[in-house]
Image: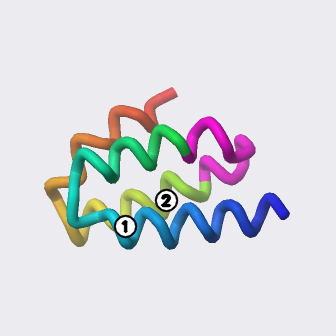
């Protein structure tokens, strides 16, 4: 079940990556719903999205410990 939530979150983030504000809101939601090890995997995924869309870089502040 938890794995499904991570995959769902990745799908949502891909779909909203066109809008920085919406993307940041979804990142914040994901951080409250996912388990710690899933958040680590999500960080890697988000960094790959940021490489494709540099404007999403400002959302990385939510991923800091």
Q: Does 13 appear above or below 59?
A: below
Residue 33 covered by magenta stretch: yes
- Residues tagged 1 and 2 counted as in contact (Cβ below 8 A): yes
Of residues 27 and 64, the one drawn nearer to the viewer in this rendering: 27
Is residue 49 positioned above or below 26 on the image? Answer: below
Residue found at x 22% / y 51%:
20
Q: Which residue is mark 1?
A: 48
Mark 1 element type:
helix
Q: What range is drawn magenta here?
A: 30-40
Among the 4 quarters of the image, the one containing residue 41:
bottom right
Instruction: Indicate the position of residue 56 as horizontal and vertical percent values.
Output: 23, 53
Please check the rendered image and state whether residue 35 is part of the magenta-colored stretch, yes or no.
Answer: yes
Q: Residue at x 71, y 41 (%)?
A: 36
- Residue occupying image coordinates x 61% and y 68%: 8
Residue 44, numbered label:
2
Label 2 CA crowd tier, 10 Å (few <14, some 14–19, many 20+): few
Q: Position of residue 39 (x, y in %)?
A: 61, 48
Calculate the distance from the C-alpha at mark 1 to the C-alpha at mark 2. Answer: 6 Å
Helix or strand or loop: what does disc 2 sit on?
helix
Q: Is residue 32 left or right of residue 15?
A: right
Task: Give percent across and percent down for residue 30.
Answer: 56, 47
Question: Looking at the image, which residue is at 33% across and 64% down?
Answer: 16
Majority secondary structure of magenta residues: helix
Q: Is residue 35 left or right of residue 49?
A: right
* Percent position of residue 27, x then y: 45, 46
Between 27 and 46, the one nearer to me in the picture: 27
Q: Residues within 10 Å of mark 1 (few under 14, many from 20)?
A: few
Residue closer to the observer: 54 or 3: 3
């Amino acid at each position: 079940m938890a794995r499904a939530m991570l995959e769902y979150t990745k799908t949502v983030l891909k779909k909203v990556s066109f809008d920085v504000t919406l993307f940041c809101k979804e990142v914040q939601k994901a951080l409250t719903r996912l388990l710690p090890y899933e958040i680590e995997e999500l960080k890697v995924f988000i960094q790959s999205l940021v490489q494709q869309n540099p404007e999403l870089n400002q959302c990385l502040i939510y991923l800091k410990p």
